[in-house]
Image (spheres, grey):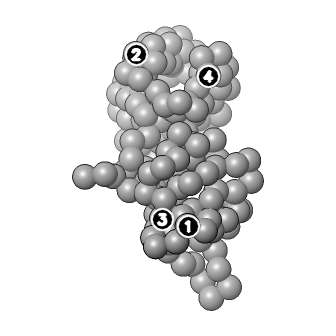
Amino acid sequence: MDRMFVERIVGRISPFLETFLGSKGLFIVDIIIRGQKGNLVLEVFIDGDTGVNTAACAETSRALSKELDERVLQGENYALTVSSPGLDRPLKFPRQYAKHAGREIMLEVRADGGPVRITGILAEARADAVGIRMKGSEALTEVPFSDILEARIKPRW
């Protein structure tokens, strides 16, 4: 798919979504566009500081569909999905961490010898770092957000 075409779509819907979602205490996590012109698939992942429910996803989908139909993709065929990021997607923004406090987290962090994977309990999330409690330890390992290459919540099952 033409990268400039995708960037144009993302550039046109991002401001709309930021305003719409911001008024509801939500934010964009990711926008994925695939397929080809005339038969696009748009996936929009949204979140909130306390999570996001299906009603918010449905409301966002209706509003974004209207915006796409009227201003962005007039007459183009597309499929739109709006959902929460789910546990299988990495955390992208510091504000996503706090609601997962107390859960097991897997991190890939920047280290002198190359990336290192660590797993522990997410004990706290601050503006600049997270505190991880490693198994068998009461001490917190502080990991600055700037050192986190990837973070995923480990499912409980």
- Give the CA distance from mark 4 to mark 2: 14 Å
The mark nearer the N terminus, 4 or 2, is 4
Left or right for 49, reference 152: right
Is 66 on the left-hand or right-hand side of 83?
right
Cα separation between marks 4 and 3: 29 Å
Q: CA distance from mark 3 to mark 1?
A: 11 Å
Q: CA distance from mark 3 to mark 2?
A: 33 Å
Numbered disc in front, either 1 or 2: 1
Label 1: how many residues lie within 10 Å, few (<14), some (14-19) or many (20+)?
few
Amino acid type, callout 2: Ala
* Neighbourhood count class around disc 4 (C-alpha, 10 Å): few under 14, some 14–19, many 20 upward: few
Q: Residue at x 53, y 39 (%)?
A: 99
**Where residue 5 appears, x then y in whole percent?**
56, 39
Instruction: Confirm whether residue 6 shows in the render.
Output: no
Q: Of 129 and 55, which appears nearest the observer?
A: 129
Most distant residue in the bottom direction = 113
Find disc 2 in the rendering and name its residue. 55
Instruction: Give the residue at x 39% y 47%.
Output: 87
First of labels 1, 2 by sequence position = 2
The numbered mark, 3 or 1, whose residue comes first in the sequence reads 3
